[in-house]
Image (spheres, helix red, strand yellow):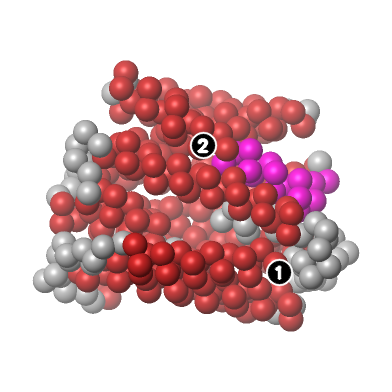
Amino acid sequence: MGLVFPILPSLFFGQGSVFPMGTPHAELWAYSIALAVWPFGLFVGGPVIGELSDKFGRKPTLLIALSLTAVAYGLSAASILIGNFWLFVVSRLMSGVVGGAYEVAQATVVDISDKETKARNLGYVSMAASIGFVIGPVVTSLSTSGWLSWMTISTPFWIAMGLAAINTLSILKLLERDKPKHPDLKLHPIGAAKTVGFLFLDKRVLYIGAIYLLLQAGWGFYTQGVALFMHHYYHYDTGSTGYFYAAMGLAVALCSVSVQPWLLKRFSPRTLYSVMGVICALLLVIAMLSKPLVVQWITAVLGSATQFICYTVVLMLLSGSVSEKEQGKVMGSAGAGFGLAWGSMIY
């Protein structure tokens, strides 16, 4: 995500766009589709991957998902080279379908954690993701700057393909094979549909799931839309946008290792979510109403940190609401909720 977000405005807008659509209206729709198709794929595939990991084990599921991720990024790079918008859409959809690997990683961490260490260990996973969100935009900024002749706007996608391949090999060599948590689970389309609706239908997680969806919808609108906003109003290019996203990721990384553990020891999850949620909402309002560029940077950094705390707390509550056998299921459903919320930006 960190590699892709800074690039997208340059693919659709401006004289050198890779996918020219002819009219501003068509460009906006194409841009929205390119953004929405990845979370839509996650909405469809996330719960399935979660259940597959419960039935067959975390390791084989991760290996398959990350292998297909590498293929998807290769197709994205190829679509840019040949200027084929619909191949790009298909590749982003494919990447989203197997994007539930992140939730499987979270379920893996839950498996090896107890009540005392669950919050800390989930924080480590989120910290790793946030560090990736720091590195990704920086890599994008450097690899599209033209300082080496062979670097083009497709280069970050080739890099992402290589990283996914390395990740696959790392899991193959370093992650121990785990025992399936629910080997007798029967997989069928109706069951997958029920898993998608798990956050909406199961009374144990219904209200927490609703909170999670609202959180992801609000932050998803901002995170996906801010690149286009910075491009249009502050004339940010791919490099500047990359550094903007990197600052957001750095704020989350620092928060996860310093501020969040301190807060979790002193406040209940409900209190912490309520306070941080209100602060995050106020920061978004300030960003919407303010014109100075420095305000956009400050609200992005502080908003990322407060949203991260809310996200971790909600995951803790979701995980603690279900049995050990259902960890993959609830994390897969969380991934589907993420995809539903972020994919709705197309409207």
318 and 177: which one is in front? 177
Question: Residue shown at 80%/57% (left/top)?
Answer: 145
Q: Horizontal and vertical percent for residue 342?
A: 51, 53
Q: Amino acid at mark 2?
A: Val
Q: Residues within 10 Å of mark 2 (few under 14, many from 20)?
A: many
Q: Give the Cα distance between marks 2 and 1.
A: 27 Å
Q: Secondary structure at mark 2?
A: helix
Q: Which mark is residue 154?
A: 1
For the question of whether residue 190 can be seen, the reply is: yes
Residue flagged by tag 1: what amino acid is it?
Ser
**Which residue is at a point 80% across and 51% down the rendered structure image?**
237
Q: Which residues are magenta?
A: 235-249
Report the disc number at residue 252: 2
Position of the N terminus, as image quadrant, is bottom right
Q: Is residue 230 magenta?
A: no
Task: Give left or right: position of 303 versus 77.
Answer: left
